[in-house]
Amino acid sequence: MTRDPHGDSPHAPTVTRTGTDGAAAPPPGAPRAPLATYRLLASLGDFRTLRLDDSLVRLKRWEFTGAGEIPEVFGAEWVGEEHWPASEFASSYPDAPVLSARVAGLLREELLSAGRLVPVRRVRGAGPRKPGDAAELDHVVYVVEKVVDCLDPARSSAPRPPTGEIERAVFRPDALPVELPAFRLPQFPVAVYWNAWAVDRLRALLGPQVEARLAWSQDPAARPHPNLWGV
């Protein structure tokens, strides 16, 4: 599917192309070097996670084409053993991170610089309710709206159809949006890349609940994860 970055929606993502004069500075306290990007996933530990409903399909359609609207609410159901605690990083979808309201609140200003926080509600009929469950869950989907053309195509793997998945991404340091916690690429619009400073903050808050896989680093000794987009 060919992605029209303009689309026909008033909420279509804007593709940012930064020049050789460098990206804006990261938030105060954010590390400046070496630059690195990551994919974040829910831990494989004993935590309950959330499975989104067909609202995820609508999100992907918007990401690919800019058509339609971002869902105003996402339906979801819990996955995992009943006695496990609910994860505060509750999904491994490449393009739909699910955060607890607590974590989203602590990082609200930073997160909103790149997207929006959309509430999650429990799908009716999605099995027996567990203690503490409610119609509106204490989680949000972080929809990353910032699309930044910062890939070095000559040094990166070619995007693979149909999603545009990039097995090995190499970024242009002068174009990397280091001021943002996360961003998407126009070549691979259904995946979120996280900047290192945001990953550090989330790890500090979440501990073993989140897995961080290195996608790219300025450090020549660093090795990207061999199965970045796998489960």
Image: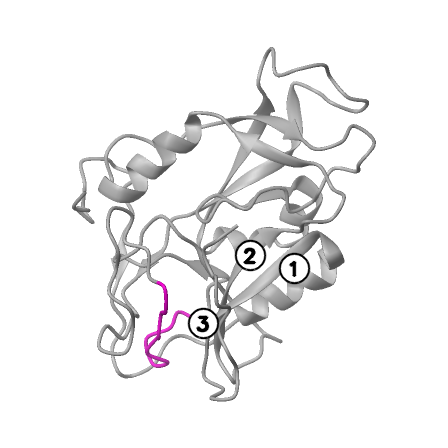
Measured in 3D between alpha carbons, the distance from the residue under mark 1 to the one under mark 2, in whole angstroms, is 10 Å
**Callout 1: 10 Å neighbours few (<14), some, many (20+)?**
many
Q: Nearer the viewer, residue 120 or 60?
A: 60
Counting residues from the start of the chain, the first of labels 2 and 3 encountered is 2
Counting residues from the start of the chain, the first of labels 1 and 2 encountered is 2
Using the image, determine if residue 217 lies above or below residue 229: below
Q: Secondary structure at mark 3?
A: loop
Identity, as a three-letter code, of the amino acid under mark 1: Leu
Residue placed at 74% from the left, 23% from the top? 133
- Give percent across and percent down for residue 214: 52, 69
Q: Is residue 174 magenta?
A: yes
Residue lying furthest bottom: 220
- Give percent across and percent down for residue 188: 30, 55
Which mark, residue 178?
A: 3
Identity, as a three-letter code, of the amino acid under mark 3: Val
Which mark, residue 202?
A: 1
Which mark, residue 40?
A: 2
